[in-house]
Image: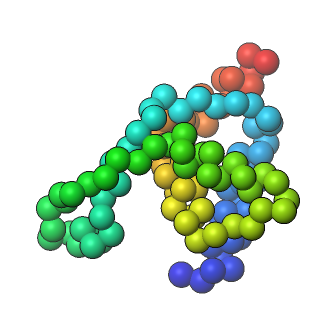
Amino acid sequence: MNIQDLATIMMRLSRHLGQFGNRRIEIPVAYYWEVGEKVKYDPYAVPGGCTLGDIEDDWQDLSRLLREEEKPIILDLRDLASVLIAFADHITEEDITSTIDKV
């Protein structure tokens, strides 16, 4: 994967999401299972030794980046991925569009 292509895709998705305005979206889950990296990418392994992740903690960690003086770190990508997965698993464009129509 090309990093610039990934950045372009993220910007397009960000613009798409941005068209729905400044709405607060509730994700109806708090926790998720984090599968170890060795097992996650081995289709022949049976997952075990999972750890519990917390969407709110991930979001709090990411929220520091709203301050311009804060610098991103690699771990922020994991936090962002967890939040985006929870978002994608629980929110559809229809949900967002219907919320906008009601405002």
Q: Looking at the rendering, which quadrant does residue 25 occupy?
A: top right
Q: Residue at x 24, y 68 (%)?
A: 39
- Is 103 positioned to the left or the right of 51 in the image? right
- Is the residue 55 above or below the residue 10 in the image? above
Residue 71 visible from this viewpoint? yes
- Is 67 positioned to the left or the right of 6 in the image? right
- Is 65 positioned to the left or the right of 54 in the image? right
Image mark count: 0
Q: Residue at x 15, y 68 (%)?
A: 45
Q: Position of residue 42 (x, y in %)?
A: 23, 72
- Is the residue 74 above or below the residue 66 in the image? below
Residue pushed farthest bottom?
A: 2
- Is 101 positioned to the left or the right of 83 in the image? right
- Is the residue 33 above or below the residue 37 in the image? above
Residue 88 visible from this viewpoint? no
Q: Position of residue 41 (x, y in %)?
A: 29, 71
Q: Looking at the rendering, which quadrant does residue 18 occupy?
A: top right
- Front residue (pair 54, 13): 54
Q: Residue at x 46, y 43 (%)?
A: 54
Q: How is the image coloured?
A: rainbow
Residue pushed farthest top?
A: 102
Q: Is the C terminus in the top left, top right, bottom left or bottom right quadrant?
A: top right
- Is the residue 83 above or below the residue 96 in the image? below
- Front residue (pair 19, 80): 80
Q: Residue at x 49, y 52 (%)?
A: 82
Q: Position of residue 12 (x, y in %)?
A: 72, 60
Q: Position of residue 53 (x, y in %)?
A: 41, 48
